[in-house]
Every structure is written in C-alpha cells, then in structure tokens.
Amino acid sequence: MHIRARVLAFAAAPALLAAPGAVWACSVAGDYRVPTNLELAAEANAIVLGEVVGATEAVSAPDEALSSAIAVRPLATLKGLTPGDTLVLRGMMLAQPGAPADAREQVDFAEPHPEARAGACIRRSFPAGATVLFFLRRADGAWVPAGGPLSRWAEDVVGPGADSEDPWVQLSTLYVHAAQLAPPERQALLEDQLEALQARIDAEADDDPVTLALATDIERAMAAPGFPQIAARRPDPPPAPAGEAADLGELGAGIDALGRDPADR
C-alpha cells in the first residue's frame, strides 16, 4: 500500500523511542515493546470516557496509607462495564494550575504522552474538567492503567459521548471490535478499513492529518509481531521508581485471552 510513503513522518514516531540520543527519565528494559493501540484495547477490561472532577484520596489496601488519586465521572463506556458513578484512580493527581496543555501540532497515535517520559513512564496528571479516554484493567480490586509503560492509556478527547467524532474515540471503537474477532476476521476488518482510508486520501485534494494518522496506526497494529493474533503476554514492565510504586499500583502488561465469548469481556 502506498499509504506508507505518505505517512512516513507519522510512522517514524515510534522509532524515536529507541533513539540513542533520547535521554528520558523513564527507563524500560531493552526487550520491552510498547503495546500497539490494538493490543491496548484488547488488554483493557474497560475503556471509559470520563470527566475529571477533582482530586481525592484512596486506600489501596487496609494496611496501607492514603495515596493521591483523582475522581472521574464516567460519561460513556466503549468496552466493559461502567465502573460505578465515580471512578477513583489512585496514583494520579490534578495538573498544577498553569501547567502547559498537551497541545500537539499533529495527530499522532503512536508517540507516548509527553508526561510518560518522566519517571513513572505513564501519564499521571490531569486538568480538572478534562474529558479523557481511559484504558483500564482490574488489579487487586482496583482500576489501574492498562498497557504498561509508554502506552496511550489516558488521552484527552473532544466530545462527551461514545458517538464523539474525536479521532481517539473512532480508533478505539474500531480496535475494540477488531479485538473481539477471530484472527482471520480481524485481519480482514483492518485491511478493509485501511483500503477505505486510502480511498478517502486519494479522493481529497489535501491530505487530512486525521485520516493519515488513522491509516498509519492501523498499519502499525498489523505490523506487530504475530498479527493477526494478539500476543497473550508481553514482558513485564519494570517497577516504578522508588517512592512511586505504592501510588501506581500493579502495572503488569498481560493481555486478556481472546478465546472467551466477547459478551464476557
């Protein structure tokens, strides 16, 4: 497909993660592979659009001290069950007043959130009132980030519902459906979507950055090792830096088996 030639700038972003000159506070094992967004959608027990309503406190276990947390009001659910009237995410915090917004010059589904480059390797701060698409899984009775280090587990979106035209909502909805299919059907679905995006690109006088980014991410998902299978398990992520492990909770990167009936996921 000649999409590859037209979206090279988008596709090159993941390679920057391993660039020798990149000096980041976040450090991962040499054999660690950042999950594709398809793998992220497959791993998540719940994908929830939610409004960040404020800071709160949470206790991860009866014998542990209070930890920082944010309270989120669920607005819509793309996968799984809506986690109650209020979702508490421990280890997270409100963004400081005056903190720079994550204003990106181009749509990019591969490059980690800028905050993920810090010691915790994931995004942890959120502006009050922001609408965010959260990829979550259950661990020790709590909701924790899915995907592991450098994954796109929490992204700001435009629009309050699952019918939003926000690119992240569109892509996630596609991948949730694809993850529930048998491998041959999964490959056929994504190939069809890629062809449709190519037709849209060819029909437009100017390249639409959203269309290009969607096509690039689908190609990236299809180029992952073992596709159209989705790996049952990736290497465990490294532990969080000292002093942060209790707040972050378990960040294991196992992907839920896809052999179950989709209604049970």
Image (cartoon, rainbow, N blue to C red):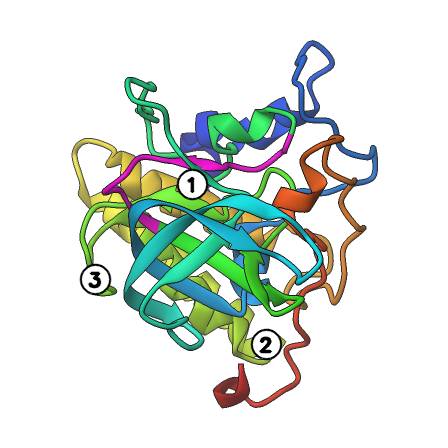
Q: Are marks 2 and 3 in contact (CB under 8 Å)?
A: no
Sequence-wise, the earlier of marks 3 and 1 is 1
Q: Nearer the viewer, mark 3 or mark 1?
A: 3
Question: Are discs 3 and 1 less than 8 Å apart at CB?
Answer: no
For label 1, the residue is 3
Q: Nearer the viewer, residue 182 or 86?
A: 86
Residue 236 lies left or right of residue 249; in this view the side is right
Residue at 44 percent of width and 57 percent of height: 88
Q: Residues within 10 Å of mark 2 (few under 14, many from 20)?
A: few
Residue lying farthest to the top in this orientation: 21
At 63% from the left and 45% from the top, the residue drawn is 248
Q: Is residue 124 magenta?
A: yes
- The CA distance from mark 1 to mark 2 is 22 Å
Q: Amino acid under label 1?
A: Ile
Q: Is residue 190 above or below residue 167?
A: below
Q: Position of residue 16 (x, y in %)?
A: 61, 22
Please, what secondary structure does the residue beneath circle 1 have?
helix
Q: Identity of the amino acid at label 2?
A: Pro
Q: Nearer the viewer, mark 1 or mark 2?
A: 2
Q: Dot 2 corresponds to which residue?
A: 184
